Amino acid sequence: MAILGVPILEDKYPYTMDMWPLECKEFNRLYKFYEHLKEGRFTTTRCRTCGHVAYPPRVICPECYSEDLEWIDLPTKGKVIVFTEQIRGVPLGFESPLIHAHIDLGEGSPIRKILSRIINCPAGKLKEGDEVQLVVFPIPSHPIEVKGGEMKWVDRVFFAFEPVQK
Amino acid sequence: MVRRVCIVGGGMSKWGVREASLWDLVQEAGKECFEDVPGLKPKDVDGLIFANATAGRRGFQINSAPICAERLGIKPKSICARVDVLCASGSTGILLAYGLIASGMADIIMVVGAEKCYTPQKWEIFYSELATGDHDWDCVHGLGLPPPFFAMVAKEHMKHYGTTKEQLAWVSVINYNYGAENPKAQFQKKLTLEEALNAPEVVPPLTLYDCCPITDGAAAVILACEEKAKDLMDRPLVYIRGGAQASLHACSANWPGEHFADWPHLKVAAQRAYEIAKVGPEDIDVAQTHDCFSISQIIEVEELGFCKKGEGGPFIESGQTKIGGKIPINTDGGLLSVGHPFGGTGIRQAIEIMKQLQGRARFQVEGAEIGLTHNLSGLNFEHTIVIYGREPVK
């Protein structure tokens, strides 16, 4: 029988094929975003110098280039502006129906709209104007080589939105 | 001193699902391009720009420009570089070559655009699409494969402007029927409105013929300073009058418009391109707009100023993009029927506009003097426009 796959990669972690971000502080100065997610908080950065709120979060303010930024909370509930449901041809790593929605986070939010995946929702149920809320879920952990080839495992999470049960 | 720059010739490989590698396709396009300019030999080309977005992802190949040059027997002396703006890589290569020749840094540049999209297993084709947007913030939501995003664009256009599914279908019917006569097209198919309306669903409201296919293919053009262009051929000269590229956001959360069917970044690019080329939308005789989806072309004719905002659907339904209409568009079949190998698309568009202005297109717009090409990139973060003319900007 033929050997499937790429034999030399057996037991290896090819980051170039990982669909999730490297969230740990060894690789990402925005690691707090993911730590906040684990606490159920949806956050981004605000500049203490000019007040600009950026999403995605930054390490430098894109308006005034200050490095003096703070983490702020964004709303964890919003309303669906428009959405799509993909039933067939969903990319590997996602389940059908793959639902996306443009979400209005409300007038008070410094980031008004966000495009997110909607989970925990069967096909044909979502409607424009529906209320949705943040949902955080675990994603596969990955190894980092520390010293002498030793592996440290990094736990990861990511977010989507889900319908608010009426 | 700014020199005048001409597009003198071009050629392409057959586009589609090809039993060929990236470099096989590049050689096929290069051969046809040199055949189109019989006076030119590879050794006369002093610069090469390779427009390719995904060889690093789909082919384990980076720094690909020198390899492209070697495969084509070209030994560049002025420039040898790869450019990636995904779907607009080819047009971007043309804009950069224009700048280099206009400045005097280069005399004759070949711009080659190519993409090998099919990998041995289908999952990887779609999986790699998760690299085409802001990976950490958008693509992690399963965005990247374009139909879901453009389905939302279509729903918003229907909601705000009353566009119908039939109007979307007219874009496909008109473009497919141009492409039916194009031997290089992925699909040579006469399409009827009825077939388009009864096609299988992709992501509602988009159905099969609303979406461009996944394509392997290559195309190449030669750009030269006016003096060299006159020596190289006796066809009418076609000048690059100017162009522009605009990007106002990259993550979907920062969408620059009121809603997904409002594309202010295209308007910004168009205004600047028209200013630089010293023309207005009413002066354009023939155009190539980025019909990655039927709805895209409807919005593009609005934002490019060919009709009023919101009237793109009726504009196309009433035949204004057919030969004899207000502005024939995608007269070689467009992305919908010829296909869309990212780096190749802008080059294909340039070839069609060049042929239209030289009077040798398959569906000829009589007396065409000024032509335009337009691309959008990825999940709509960038718009690229090139304007060509029988006369240089004075």
Image (spheres, grey):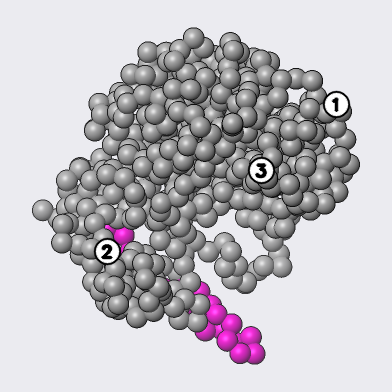
| Total marks in image | 3
Amino acid beneath label 2:
Val
In the picture of the structure, the residue carrying the numbered disc 1 is B38
In the picture of the structure, the residue carrying the numbered disc 2 is A135
Expressed as whole percent of the image width and height from the top left, the position of residue B9 reads 74, 28
State the extent of the magenta-drawn residues as a range: A141-162
Helix or strand or loop: what does disc 1 sit on?
A: loop
In the picture of the structure, the residue carrying the numbered disc 3 is B2
User: Up-down: is B21 above or below B328?
Assistant: below
Res A73 quadrant in image: bottom left
Please state the chain letter of the residue tagged with numbered disc 2 in the rendered image.
A
Amino acid beneath label 1:
Pro
Taking the spot 61% from the left edge, 90% from the top edge, the residue there is A147
> Which quarter of the rendered picture does the N terminus of chain B lie within?
top right
> Which quarter of the rendered picture does the C terminus of chain B lie within?
top right
Expressed as whole percent of the image width and height from the top left, the position of residue A93 reads 46, 56
Taking the spot 70% from the left edge, 58% from the top edge, the residue there is B62
Label 2 CA crowd tier, 10 Å (few <14, some 14–19, many 20+): many
